[in-house]
Image (cartoon, grey):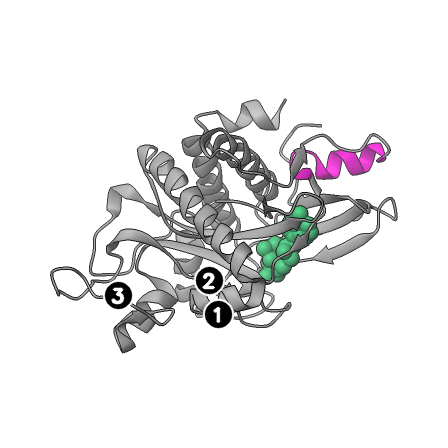
């Protein structure tokens, strides 16, 4: 039963707990008013569309990577609170459901999520590079360098920057906003804490990943509010290849776009086949295997643990 499982593209808890949301990757169920069952499926998206088949064990890898970081970051950042409760499954779930969602599920505290995406960038790429190239700013902030020379594509920034965005509804597009705008949305007091936490989380994670040969170029955090204590709590998935840009450190070079640690095989194949941005694309076996290998490699590098040890436990 711990043999390679065929990809889990959608979960079906058959009415055991109500489904509260199905995102691009996660199926979220309600256990009770304070607790969510957070299930990562094997769905994968590239160029903003979800492929019709999945990457076996990808969801499990994402969940175990997040769990690793929750623990690691809590030990590094004093006062950090996270939504993580346990990797155990509710005992009431049927055996077949337990088998379907094993290793890919965590129970988390259900919180009111702040309606912004807390993005931190240590390198200039993606939408930040696009804005900088056109206007010399990132999220409306001036990005001039001490020596006056222009930044190059993919260059490491002198210090990481906080570049929040709006959190669009499903199908919508997030918009980069100035930190002042984020403060108007969530309120000054929480905005300050969110920014400070985001920057510390990114710095600790970047340092750790770099030792393992992975550059975390940028990442997206989400935060919720514990109303009982008025504390800002780290929620959602954290520092996975899906919520971050991971680059292989071995091939990093400024002045051009970088390869993606995890999605390069898929992107290259989609481009080659003229399938970029098309709906309902079925990945061939070889692309699935190569991509699965990269997600596993990311887990093993970051945690220092063999994946088989976790998957088979
Ligand atoms: P998509 O990935 O399709 O853009 P998404 O990011 O909203 O959508 P997922 O990441 O698949 O979807 O699902 C996670 C959802 O659960 C997000 O909407 C996130 O804000 C929400 N969420 C994360 N942690 C908590 C929490 N502790 N309490 C309540 N909601 C949470
Ligand atoms: Mg998400």
Q: Measured along the vertical axis of the image, is residue 243 above or below residue 89?
A: below
Sequence-wise, the earlier of marks 2 and 1 is 2
At 53% across and 35% down in the image, what residue appears?
Answer: 79
**Distance in Å between CA atoms under marks 3 and 2:** 16 Å
Mark in front: 2 vs 1: 1
Element under disc 2: loop
Sequence-wise, the earlier of marks 3 and 1 is 3
Identify the residue position indicated by label 3 in the image.
143
Identify the residue position indicated by label 2 in the image.
164
Q: Is residue 200 shown in magenta?
A: no
Side of 301 where 61 appears, left or right: right
Q: Are marks 2 and 1 in contact (CB under 8 Å)?
A: yes
Q: What residue span does the magenta drawing correspond to?
A: 93-107
Is residue 39 among the parts visible in the rendering?
Answer: yes
Q: Which mark is residue 120?
A: none
From this viewpoint, which residue is outermost toward the bottom? 134
Label 3 packing within 10 angstroms: few (<14), some (14-19), many (20+): some
Mark in front: 3 vs 1: 1
Quadrant of the snapshot with the N terminus: top right
Label 1 packing within 10 angstroms: few (<14), some (14-19), many (20+): some
Sequence-wise, the earlier of marks 3 and 2 is 3
Identify the residue position indicated by label 1 in the image.
181
Side of 16 where 207 appears, left or right: left
**Distance in Å between CA atoms under marks 2 and 1:** 9 Å
Q: Quadrant of residue 310?
A: top right
């Amino acid at each position: 039963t711990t043999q390679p499982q065929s990809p889990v593209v959608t979960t079906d808890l058959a009415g055991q707990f109500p489904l509260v949301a199905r995102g691009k990757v996660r199926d979220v169920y309600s256990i009770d008013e304070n607790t969510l069952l957070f299930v990562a499926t094997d769905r994968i998206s590239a160029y903003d569309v979800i492929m019709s088949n999945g990457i076996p064990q990808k969801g499990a890898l994402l969940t175990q990577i997040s769990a690793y970081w929750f623990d690691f970051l809590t030990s590094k950042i004093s006062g950090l609170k996270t939504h993580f409760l346990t990797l155990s499954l509710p005992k009431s779930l049927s055996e077949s459901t337990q088998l379907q969602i094993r290793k890919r599920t965590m129970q988390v505290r259900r919180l009111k999520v702040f309606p912004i995406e807390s993005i931190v960038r240590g390198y200039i790429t993606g939408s930040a590079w696009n804005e900088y190239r056109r206007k010399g700013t990132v999220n409306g902030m001036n990005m001039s360098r001490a020596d006056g020379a222009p930044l190059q594509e993919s260059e490491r920034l002198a210090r990481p920057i906080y570049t929040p965005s709006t959190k669009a509804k499903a199908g919508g597009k997030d918009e980069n906003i100035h930190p002042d705008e984020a403060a108007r949305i969530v309120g000054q007091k929480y905005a300050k804490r969110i920014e400070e936490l985001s920057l510390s989380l990114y710095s600790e994670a970047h340092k750790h990943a770099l030792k393992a040969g992975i550059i975390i170029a940028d990442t997206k955090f989400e935060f919720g509010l514990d109303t009982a204590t008025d504390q800002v709590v780290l929620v959602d998935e954290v520092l996975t290849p899906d919520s971050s840009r991971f680059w292989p450190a071995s091939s990093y070079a400024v002045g051009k776009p970088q390869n993606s640690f995890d999605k390069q095989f898929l992107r290259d194949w989609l481009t080659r086949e003229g399938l970029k941005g098309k709906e309902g694309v079925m990945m061939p076996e070889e692309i699935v295997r190569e991509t699965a290998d990269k997600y596993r490699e990311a887990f093993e590098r970051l945690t220092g643990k063999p994946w088989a040890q976790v998957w088979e436990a």
